[in-house]
Image (spheres, rainbow, N blue to C red):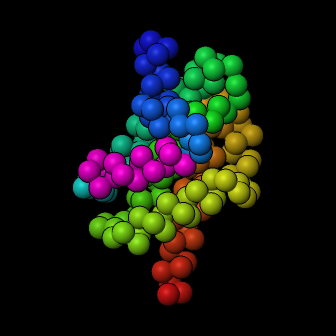
Amino acid sequence: MSDQLILFYARVAVAGKSPVMPGTCGSLVALIAAPYLFIPLPAAGRILLLALLLASGIPASGRAEKLLSRTDPPEVVIDEFFGQWLTLLPFAAPDIADYAAAFILFRFFDIVKPWPVKKAEALGGGPGIMLDDAAAGIYAILCFALLNLLF
């Protein structure tokens, strides 16, 4: 795969090129695409798609890191795309409030990076880039589930 194509993928087209909050832009693109490309899939299809995103995102983000000569470059947002969709995994038919909560919770845990999110990031390279967002997505799912139980 060409280096330009890898950067295009790792940046989720142009989302990562945003001069302001590229990670948030990557999550927003994932949120906008979800009702068309993710939510309509059966559970097994969603899990398979997430596995493919993770399996392709690790080498792509690792290569992009080398191409851009930066550790965990902000413009690499395939990890936010993956993490946002992971956060939406349990939803069968989310409404606008569910999308908003999933977005806010995922971004919160991705930015704050509580343990083990920070620990996953410390793996470095492609695994660190992708797995910290996986951990943030899992935190967001658990927090959303707890909020649903309480309210």
Q: Is residue 12 above or below residue 138?
A: above
The residue most toward the front is 19
Q: In this view, does 115 lie above or below 23?
A: below
Pick the quarter of the image with the N terminus. top left
Residue drawn at point x = 45 percent, y = 51 percent: 28
Q: Give the range drawn in magenta.
A: 24-38
State the image quarter where residue 20 is shown.
Answer: top right
- What kind of secondary structure does the magenta stretch mostly adopt? helix
- Say left or right for 102 vs 94: right
Which one is in front, 43 or 110? 110
Task: Answer yes or no: is residue 138 visible.
Answer: no
Which percent across, then down, holds residue 125?
Answer: 66, 29
Residue 27 magenta: yes
The residue most toward the top is 2
- Say left or right for 113 vs 60: right
Which percent across, then down, holds residue 53?
Answer: 43, 38
Which one is in front, 33 or 22? 22
- Say left or right for 84 vs 20: left
The total of numbered circles placed on residues is 0
State the image quarter where residue 63 is shown.
Answer: top right
Task: Answer yes or no: is residue 125 visible.
Answer: yes
Residue drawn at point x = 41 percent, y = 72 percent: 97
Q: Is residue 106 above or below residue 72?
A: below
The residue most toward the bottom is 151
Which percent across, then down, holds residue 74?
Answer: 63, 36
Which percent across, then down, holds residue 34?
Answer: 34, 52
